[in-house]
Image (cartoon, helix red, strand yellow):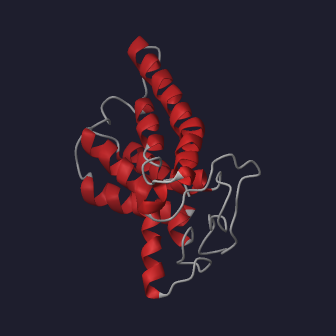
Amino acid sequence: MCSIITHPAIPIAVSFFLPRASVSPKLILIGVICSIIPDLDVVGFHFGVRYGDMLGHRGFSHSIIFAGSVAALLTITLFRGGEVDRWVIFSFLFASTLSHGLVDMLTNGGLGVALLAPFDNGRYFFPYRPIEVSPLGIANFFSRRGLEVMTSELKWVWFPSVIVSLIGYLIRRSGIYQPF
């Protein structure tokens, strides 16, 4: 997995492409939380859930169905009424949640991601996996391995996210792109 501090880079970058009327600190914060939520599956280790189980690490909580369910629930409960298009909100929260599993599929360790759970418990990776897998546990970050992971995440996630954010900002500022 990528570290918990790297997953939020994706929704932050994507937020620069949202319609101006949709962007709010609340929406971005919830998108950031959505990008982290899938890793709550590590709690299962304390209850005897094995890594490779459907409810194990990188299992159902990293799936397309989970991302859609979380996005729908949060859109319905937290964004009632208002002038903002709820499909835009749903899409942003869906992408934010799903991005977690997709980024994990770019890492070079673990058992893969159950992207198609609960219909298929197979674990998948992308063919190209340049991101160093993050160690489990905070103490492991304060080591040479932790530094290697952070360097990898800066190179493969944060730097591209900054570029995407900058492009979105410049396009929005220029007035060329007027979404919705």
Image position, residue 125 (x, y; %):
70, 58
Image position, residue 175 (x, y; %):
41, 14
Q: Is residue 160 left or right of residue 31?
A: right
Q: Is residue 170 left or right of residue 1?
A: left
Q: In which quadrant of the rendered image does the C terminus lie?
A: top left
Q: What residue sits 56% from the left and 82% below the top?
A: 50
Image position, residue 110 (x, y; %):
64, 65
Q: What residue sits 56% from the left and 32% below the top?
A: 160
Q: 63 or 36, which lies in front?
A: 36
Number of numbered discs overlaid on the protein picture: 0
Image position, residue 113 (x, y; %):
63, 64
Q: 78 or 129, which lies in front?
A: 129
Vertical relation: 30 (above or below) 62: above
Q: Residue furthest front?
A: 144
Q: What residue sits 58% from the left and 78% below the top?
A: 54
Q: Residue furthest right?
A: 127
Q: Is residue 90 left or right of residue 167?
A: left
Q: Residue furthest top?
A: 174
Q: 6 or 86, which lies in front?
A: 6
Q: In which quadrant of the rendered image does the N terminus lie?
A: bottom right
Q: What residue sits 66% from the left and 61% below the top?
A: 109
